[in-house]
Every structure is written in structure tokens, then in C-alpha cells.
Amino acid sequence: MSSAVDAPLPPGDDPWAVLRAATRARVALGRAGDALPTARELEFRAAHAAARDAVHQPLDPGLVRAQLPEVELVEVRSAAPDRATYLQRPDLGRQLAEGTSLPRTDADLAVIVADGLSPRAVHEHAAGLVSALIERLPGWSVAPLVLAHQARVALGDAVGEALGARAVVVLIGERPGLSSADSLGVYLTWAPRPGRVDSERNCVSNVRPPHGLSYAQAADTVAALLGAARELGASGVVLKDEGPALPAGAG
């Protein structure tokens, strides 16, 4: 039997309300006897269902095109033929489907929008971030935007090499969590080619306003990293992000 101490408090008397309002983490859930209160249990189940739905939701290329009507966009697929295979064979998600043909552009930058583990994140945030990033790269030649199905981060290496781009930025749906089913990650690689490893990339994660990074914050950081990578001729562990945006002299 729960004691009077365990009884739910009116919202105005809840000492944890301020903390809950400051974070998306599951904190101070309370208890009902030896279990969670019913409301908290239902919230957990809803969050778990949203995460599962985000993983399995199909990427909608028509929606992305409608959100970026002025952007030239081409579609590619990985070697994973369907979602079930993609989830079971990460290696296939890193390879372009056999017979894929992309135009040689010799551009400064290739931007790939990839479904990853949360197509929902792409639907909700990719267009805003693409627009914010391109605005911050005057003087950079940018290849046609590539929309990638059943894609892992490393697919950007094959795409970037095929396009002849000097740098590649992959915007990809991150693995959903119980507090974030719509988080978009950004991975930057200088001189992309198959065989690049994670230590040769830079990552900006949790792009998901209003609860994560805003498009402007993420674009500022990625643009600064790109400028520094161009000066250094490399990305990854040798390229440090020193703050919200790199100092002007960092490159």
C-alpha cells in the first residue's frame, strides 16, 4: 500500500515540475506502490511506439521535394533492397545499389539527405537544415542534392566520390530514443571515398528544434567546420569544433 508520502501531488505542488520542464529526459517519475504511476507508464509506452514507428516509417521523397522546390534533387538507393534487410545488414546500407549512376560535378560540396534510422527526422527537419546550410556557404559550388533510401552514414563516401565532390555532408535520421524520435544528425567528411572510417568524420547531432539544436545553430557549426576542413585538407579527429561556431582564424 502506498503511503501518504507517495500520493500524487497537485501540479502546482510538485517539487520536480521545474526539472521536468527543463529536460526531455525521464526524471522524477514518481511511483504508485511498487510501480510507476499509470500516466508515466502510458507515456513510456507511447514514446516506445513512436520510436519504433520512426524506424519503420518509409521515406517520402515527394514530401522532401515539396519542401525544397527550388533545389535540384536526385535519388539513390543503397544495396539493401528493403527495410528489413537494411536493419539486419548495416554493411549493405553503406554501399550504393549496383548500377547506380551519378553525374560527375567536381563540386566543392555534396549534400546527401539519408533516411537512416528515422525517416521521420528527415521529413521534419532536413529541408530547414539544408536551406540554412546553403545560405551560409557563399562561394561554394554545391552538387545536386542527393536523397538516399535505406542509407547509412558511409553511403555518403560512395556518393561523394561518384559526384567528384571535395567534401560531403550527410544529413541522416538518427537512432530514435524514448525522448527523441525525430533527431537529425549531420556527418561531414573531407575527400570522401569508400573506406573512410568514423575517425575521419565530424558529427553534429540532435538537430531537432525546439528541443535540440536549431537549424541556424547546426548550420553555423557545419559551415565553420567545412571552412576549416577546406583549409586543413582533412576532417575528423584532426579538426576540432571549439564552440558553437569555430573562430574565424581556426581554418
Image (cartoon, rainbow, N blue to C red):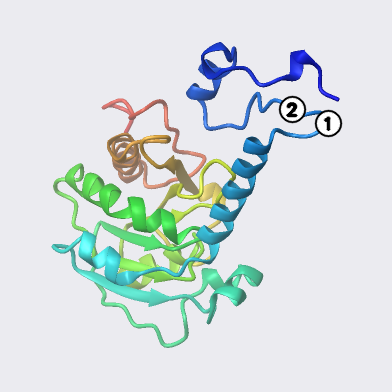
- Counting from the top left corner in percent of width and height, residue 114 is at 41, 63
Q: Residue 224 or 238: which is nearer the viewer?
A: 224
Which kind of residue does numbered mark 1 sit on?
Answer: Asp
- 10 Å crowding of disc 2: few (<14), some (14-19), many (20+): some
- 10 Å crowding of disc 1: few (<14), some (14-19), many (20+): few
Per the image, the residue denoted by label 2 is 31
- Counting from the top left corner in percent of width and height, residue 225 is at 35, 39
Which quadrant holds residue 156? bottom left
Q: Does residue 213 appear to the left or right of 45 in the view shown?
A: left
Q: Does residue 1 appear to the left or right of 156 in the view shown?
A: right
The residue at the point 36 percent across, 65 percent down is 160
**Residue 116 makes an appearance in the image:** yes
Per the image, the residue denoted by label 1 is 34
- What is the residue that sits farthest to the right in this orientation? 1
Q: Are marks 1 and 2 in contact (CB under 8 Å)?
A: yes
The residue at the point 14 percent across, 48 percent down is 139
Q: Residue 194 or 121: which is nearer the viewer?
A: 121
- Counting from the top left corner in percent of width and height, residue 147 is at 34, 68
Query: Can you say whether 54 is above or below 185 in the image?
Result: below
- Counting from the top left corner in percent of width and height, residue 249 is at 28, 26
Mark 1–mark 2 Cα distance, whole angstroms, equals: 7 Å
Q: How many marks?
A: 2
**Residue 117 makes an appearance in the image:** no
Dot 1 falls on a residue whose secondary structure is loop
The residue at the point 57 percent across, 47 percent down is 47
Q: Does residue 163 appear to the left or right of 197 in the view shown?
A: left
Which kind of residue does numbered mark 2 sit on?
Answer: Arg
The residue at the point 70 percent across, 33 percent down is 37
